[in-house]
Amino acid sequence: MTQIIPTALYSLFRSSVGGVICIFMLFLSFNAHAANHHKVSKKAPLAAQVMIKKSTKRKRVTLNGANKAYQQSDEQQEILAGSNPFRQRNVDELRITEGMHPQISTVQKNTMVTAKREVIANLMKQLGKPYRYGGMSPRTGFDCSGLVNYAYREHLKSALPRTANNMFHMSDEQAIKVEKQQLHSGDLVFFRTHSRRSGYADHVGVYLGDGEFIQAPRTGKDIQISRLDDDYWQDHYIGARRVLLPTAVR
């Protein structure tokens, strides 16, 4: 009897400890399952996850596109900043001429060159003919402004004024002022030989180049070529005008 009681108590104790352990393991398993269930429940549905991923992707694409567009705009700004804002588009149609006009087409240039060549040729044909006051014809002779009118009349859209002073004061549409250092053949050179009025031109000639000009000087003299650097003409020189312009030549 004494031996049976301890044995029974030991068996009961072992079974109780085992039960406690089993209950404890079940408790731990239940807590772990609850925790996992809680975590899973926080996740959004699959459709929502897909939408979230898509929206995130769209945002990234949008930002990348914006960065690219910003970079492109920066590059365009750099190009524009380094370019000439006043640059002509049809550059091939523009030509820089010698003493005529800063930018003209090839057709205009050829027309002007031809006109200048023929004007100079007409003037040279009149060398040696007599001065005649009021004259405008090779048959009768020329005065200074008559000689200029005769040489240019076939090559300008509008006729030149009759007197030297009116030629000197032509509008900017008919003629442009030319500095003495920028004279070219075909330019008109003006002098004040008798008048005491400042800025009044009473004599005109046509510049030929190399410091020479052709003129009908005065009564008793023939049409001749003179030097612009002679003391007399330097003292009486008052300016020059260019009439062979792109808008004026026929």
Image: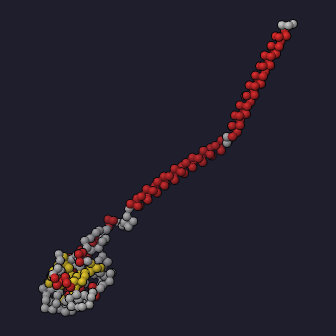
Query: Residue at position x 21%, y 91% from top?
Result: 194
Q: Quadrant of the N terminus?
A: top right
Residue 89 at x, y = what percent?
37, 65
Q: Please say whether residue 249 is visible from this viewpoint.
A: no
Q: Is residue 98 above or below residue 198?
A: above
Residue 214 at x, y = what percent?
17, 82
Compare residues 120 and 36 and report the one nearer the observer: 36
Query: Residue at position x 28%, y 69% from top?
Result: 96
Query: Residue at position x 27%, y 72% from top?
Result: 109
Residue 55 at x, y = what percent?
60, 48
Residue 22, picture quadrant: top right
Q: In which quarter of the image is the C terminus?
A: bottom left
Q: Please say whether residue 179 is visible from this viewpoint.
A: yes
140 lies left or right of 64: left
Q: In this view, does 56 lie above or below 137?
A: above
24 lies left or right of 216: right
16 lies left or right of 97: right
Residue 161 at x, y = what percent?
28, 87
Residue 91, picture quadrant: bottom left
Q: Is residue 59 above or below residue 27?
A: below
Residue 225, picture quadrant: bottom left
